[in-house]
Amino acid sequence: MSVTSMARRAQIIDAAVGVIADAGYGRASFSRIAERAGLSSTRFISYHFKGKGELMSAVVQTVIGAIGDYVGERVGAEPTAAGMLRAYIESVVGFIDGHRPQMAALTEVMLGAGFDDGIAGDQAATTELEKMFAFGQRTGEFRDFDTRVMASTVQRSVDGLPFLLRADPGIDCARWASELVVIFDRATVR
């Protein structure tokens, strides 16, 4: 794929995110997306994506990939399991707060289309959390607990934030993250 083609796909995906975040999944037509992207025709979208499903899959993959990159960089910089857990919670919440249109679009696509491509991203996050908790147990930082239950609980606590922000955009996300860090620190400490 050429650089120009990759740039056009990114432009279309960004426009789709904006339309979905503003108007919802149901109203995210190719014509609205083309207009938002500054394209003269929907044929530009059809050239790069076989249909709405493929475009929505690209939206989901792009947002989940961005979350993974953002969070992974911060978690990877931490030498301790407790530091990794703190970094995970703070960076996921920070990403959600700083990328509200992307998170709104992700939520809309997942719910509006009955889309299941996000399941792989969720499973990857939960698996990485389980590994982090197992590491903390091996090093003696964390008490003995079921790592799958704890990983799922952490993941669900951050996954719910975009829904809450839709109803109450004034939520103090920094405080939200801080409270979650305290909760899970107390739940995992030896």
Image (cartoon, helix red, strand yellow):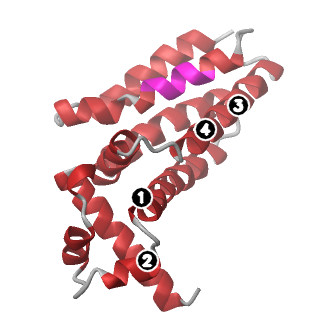
Height in image: 32 above or below 87?
Answer: below
Above or below residue 148? Residue 29 is below
In the rendered structure, find residue 9 and report the number of the disc placed on it: 2
The amino acid pointed to by label 3 is Met
Q: Amino acid at mark 4?
A: Ala
Q: Residues within 10 Å of mark 1 (few under 14, many from 20)?
A: many
Instruction: Find disc 1 in the rendering and name its residue.
Output: 56
Q: Earlier in the sequence, mark 2 or mark 3?
A: 2
The residue positioned 68% from the left and 36% from the top of the image is 128
Label disc, if present, on residue 125 of the rendered structure:
4
Q: Quadrant of residue 69?
A: bottom right
Asked which secondary structure carries label 4, the reply is helix
Q: CA distance from mark 1 to mark 4?
A: 21 Å
Residue range corresponding to the magenta coloring = 151-157
The reply to whether callout 2 and callout 4 are in contact (CB within 8 Å) is no
Q: Tell me the quadrant of the picture where the N terminus can be found.
A: bottom right
Badge 1 marks a residue whose secondary structure is helix
> Closer to the camera: disc 2 or disc 3?
2
Q: Nearer the viewer, residue 54 or 144?
A: 54
Looking at the image, is mark 2 or mark 4 nearer the viewer?
2
Q: Is residue 152 magenta?
A: yes
Q: Earlier in the sequence, mark 3 or mark 1?
A: 1
What separation in Å lies between label 3 and label 4 (alpha carbons)? 11 Å
Mark 1 vs mark 4, foreground winner is 1
Query: Label 1 amino acid?
Result: Met
Which of 183 and 1 lies nearest the eye of the viewer? Answer: 1
Q: Secondary structure at mark 2?
A: helix
- Sequence-first disc among 1 and 4: 1
- Which residue is drawn at the image coordinates 34% and 31% (left, top)? 161
Quadrant the C terminus occupies: top right
Q: Earlier in the sequence, mark 2 or mark 1?
A: 2
